[in-house]
Amino acid sequence: MLASALDDDDDVGKILVLLRDGRKLMGTLRSFDQFANAVLEGACERVIVGEQYCDIPLGLYVIRGENVVLIGDLDTEREELPPHMIRVSETEIKRVKAPQHKSYKLIVPYVS
């Protein structure tokens, strides 16, 4: 699958890479090796929070293979999101996402 993505020079397609931390990256595969290390050109991270999403541009991106969970072809003609999804700006998605990542300390009273 990966080799065929590199061989098709005239029909260069996008791939989706799912990382261990849950991030979803999309871009054009330019190189890879036996350890699943990969180089994506024109990469972007798709962030989805509730019914909002944003594609954050990353440019040329090197991915370490140990972080890869899944790599797959993206069909650009069928790359559709459900109609209820709303595209928002990078600033807005970060604002909405921020409360989800705050860590709260659990305070347990000491009982003797």
Image: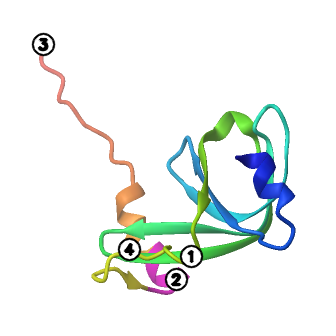
In this view of the protein, which residue sits in the foreground, 43 or 28? 28
Q: Which mark is residue 13?
A: none
Q: Earlier in the sequence, mark 2 or mark 4?
A: 2
Answer left or right for 18 relative to 67: left
The picture quadrant where one finds residue 84 is bottom left
Q: Are dots 2 and 4 in contact, CB under 8 Å?
A: no
Q: Which residue is mark 1?
A: 55
- The span from disc 2 to disc 4 (Cα, nearest Å) is 9 Å
- The span from disc 4 to disc 3 (Cα, nearest Å) is 42 Å
Farthest residue in the top direction? Answer: 112
Give the amino acid at mark 2. Thr
Q: Secondary structure at mark 3?
A: loop
Q: Earlier in the sequence, mark 1 or mark 2?
A: 1
User: Which of pointers 4 and 3 indicates the residue nearer the eye?
Assistant: 4
- The span from disc 1 to disc 3 (Cα, nearest Å) is 53 Å
Q: Are dots 1 and 3 in contact, CB under 8 Å?
A: no
Q: Earlier in the sequence, mark 4 or mark 3?
A: 4
Q: Which mark is residue 96?
A: 4
Range of magenta residues: 88-94
Circle 3 crowding by C-alpha within 10 Å: few under 14, some 14–19, many from 20: few
The picture quadrant where one finds residue 26 is bottom right
Circle 2 crowding by C-alpha within 10 Å: few under 14, some 14–19, many from 20: few
Q: Which residue is mark 2?
A: 91
Give the residue drawn at x 45%, y 83%.
Answer: 92
Q: Are dots 4 and 3 in contact, CB under 8 Å?
A: no
